[in-house]
Image (cartoon, rainbow, N blue to C red):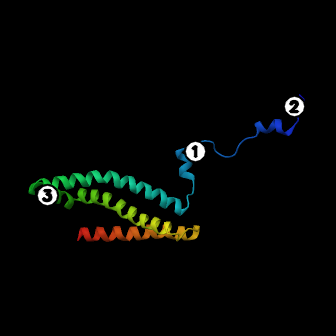
Amino acid sequence: MPFLDSPRSLSFLKIQKRPINVGIRDLLVFRFPITAISSISHRIAGIALFLGLFVMLFALQKSLESEDGFNFIRAQIASPSGLFIFFVVIAPFVFHFVAGIKHLVMDLGFGESYQVGALAAKLVFIISAILIGLIMIWLLS
């Protein structure tokens, strides 16, 4: 068979080394840069913030119904489960806010190189952790 002798005819027999489909297991193996982790976390925080909005609107509506409703919400926030729910709502808000400020600064033209972007992503995590910690200390005192 003469057509199998040419190099082009054997190209379909080569084994491709790159994955064609990326699954969950592949995502767990990848090493994402800090800028990608910050960007993905910003989006996840936005989704969590949207879902937490329903909890906060329920609490606002219940607290404005009557004095008993206000006292009920106040007692729920003082309980350990209420503190946890408050933390689950406030932590994404703080992170999303700080990451949003970083994006606004980058939109002005600052920090467009990879090195500055990586530093800014690290600062977002550090500043968010500090602010969340301060809010929780203030809430628990």
- The image quadrant that residue 22 belongs to is top right
Most extreme residue toward the top is: 1
The amino acid pointed to by label 2 is Phe
The amino acid pointed to by label 3 is Phe
Q: Is residue 117 visible?
A: yes
- Find the distance from the CA under tag 2 to the CA under tag 3: 84 Å
Q: Residues within 10 Å of mark 3 (few under 14, many from 20)?
A: some
Instruction: Give the residue at mark 2.
Output: 3
In this rendered view, identify the residue nearer to me: 9 or 101. 101
Secondary structure of the residue carrying numbered label 1: loop
- The image quadrant that residue 124 belongs to is bottom left
Instruction: Give the residue at mark 3.
Output: 70
Q: Is residue 30 above or below residue 135?
A: above
Instruction: Give the residue at mark 1.
Output: 22
Q: Residues within 10 Å of mark 2 (few under 14, many from 20)?
A: few
Task: Point out the image quarter for the C terminus.
Answer: bottom left
Task: Point out the image quarter for the N terminus.
Answer: top right
Q: Is residue 121 above or below residue 44?
A: below
**Left or right of 86, for residue 13:** right
